[in-house]
Amino acid sequence: MTLPNHFELLGRDGEARTGRLTTPHGVVRTPAFMPVGTAGAMKGLHWREVRDAGSDIVLGNTYHLMLRPGAERIAALGGLQRFTGWDGPMLTDSGGFQVMSLAQLRKVSEHAVTFRSHIDGASFELSPERAIEIQRLLGSDIAMQLDECVRLPASRDDIERAMQLSLRWGERSRLAFADAPSGTMLFGIAQGGDVPELRRASARGIVDTGFHGYAIGGLAVGEPQSVMLAMIEEAAPFLPEDRPRYLMGVGTPEDMLEAVARGIDMFDCVMPTRNGRHGLAFTRRGPVNLRNARHADDPRPLDDESDWPSTRNYSRAYLHHLVKSGETLGAMLLSEINIAYYQRLMRDVRAAISESSFEDFRVATRDLWSRGDIAPR
């Protein structure tokens, strides 16, 4: 059975694509970056700032929300959007990555993964069916199949075992999602580690199962960027042209720019807010570490040409002072500045693709990054 398609491909320039994804809570312009509100909140930011920065969609996490406050509680309170106050589209990931990276005493079987909570040690079982049930209780617009993510480097045998299990779990996730509300979507996840033939086999397998959209998972988990990009090149050609393609957990501005050039439409990462909390700002001229002493007497803003007020209106000296003093405002300002930069990059990428000038934009953007931040004379 062919699933309904909610994605419209509006244009392409080489392999780079721009499109529109329609969800029950609004339209997502692609390429899109999804800020991560892991536990139903964006660390250090109000939802208003996330929206004003240009975010169409945000991400919530099944693992964290099932542990606290609980999916059934959120459902009783009206679903994740009403619970949090974010009124736009929301994607929930399946929790598979967090089980791998956070859970204690994890055990994977054909039926499910059992684990102990990193919060209090309580025992839980997460099966493909339960992962879908939780995401439906949360009320997300886009749900993800449960998969097993293997941290790299890993043996080929372990990568292949996890990939095959993820394919079987994808089929079970699809069946469990069959009577989901109209307009909501389920994405399949291609695994395969750093093994090209496994990446191709996994991509073919999830397409045969049939999903509303397709994700590439298990990357940015320890491998070099060159390997990540090579694996995208292996998988992407096997994914349908008329469905959205999502690279999970990525990444830096450079990662996203290069992935767009290889046909990717959607991204998520904690990097903008996590780095903001640790004093690092992303700008048109590359990252700026506000912890460095050289900023202490610098009256310049981070970028006087930015259209985001906080980027333009606060001096580097003041931001440096906030960071070094441990003031909460410093983390808040740098987090919003970073989210705004990521969304500006996506906006400019979409415009360049629409104008058939993506390669020129890519070269110019990388050139500006390579020059680095210029210290005052």
Image (cartoon, rainbow, N blue to C red):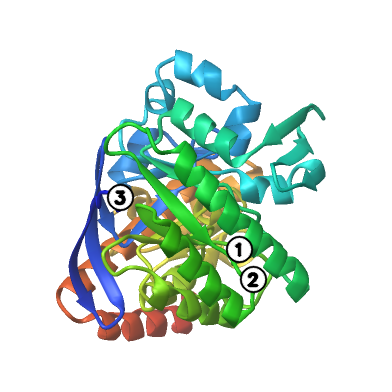
Q: Distance between the residues labelled 3 and 2?
A: 27 Å
Q: In this image, 43 relative to 140: left or right? A: right
Label 3 neighbour load within 10 Å: few <14, some 14-19, many 20+: few
Q: Mark 1 points at which residue?
A: 218
Q: Above or below — where is 90 with respect to 194? A: above
Expressed as whole percent of the image width and height from the top left, the position of residue 60 reads 49, 39
Q: What element carries label 3?
A: loop
Q: Which residue is drawn at 36% across and 38% down?
A: 141
User: Foreground mark, 3 or 2?
Assistant: 3
Q: What element carries label 1?
A: loop
Q: Residue 364 carries which label?
A: none
Q: Is mark 2 on a helix, strand or loop?
A: loop
Q: Residue at x 55, y 61 (%)?
A: 217
Q: Mark 2 points at which residue?
A: 193
Which comes sooner in the sequence, label 3 or label 1?
3
Expressed as whole percent of the image width and height from the top left, the position of residue 370 reads 47, 83
Q: Residue at x 74, y 45 (%)?
A: 102
In the rendered structure, which amino acid carries the disc numbered 2?
Gly
CB under 8 Å between discs 2 and 1: yes
Q: Is residue 348 visible?
A: yes
Q: Which residue is drawn at 48% across and 37% down?
A: 176
**Quarter location, residue 328:** top right
Which comes sooner in the sequence, label 3 or label 2?
3
Q: Mark 3 points at which residue?
A: 3
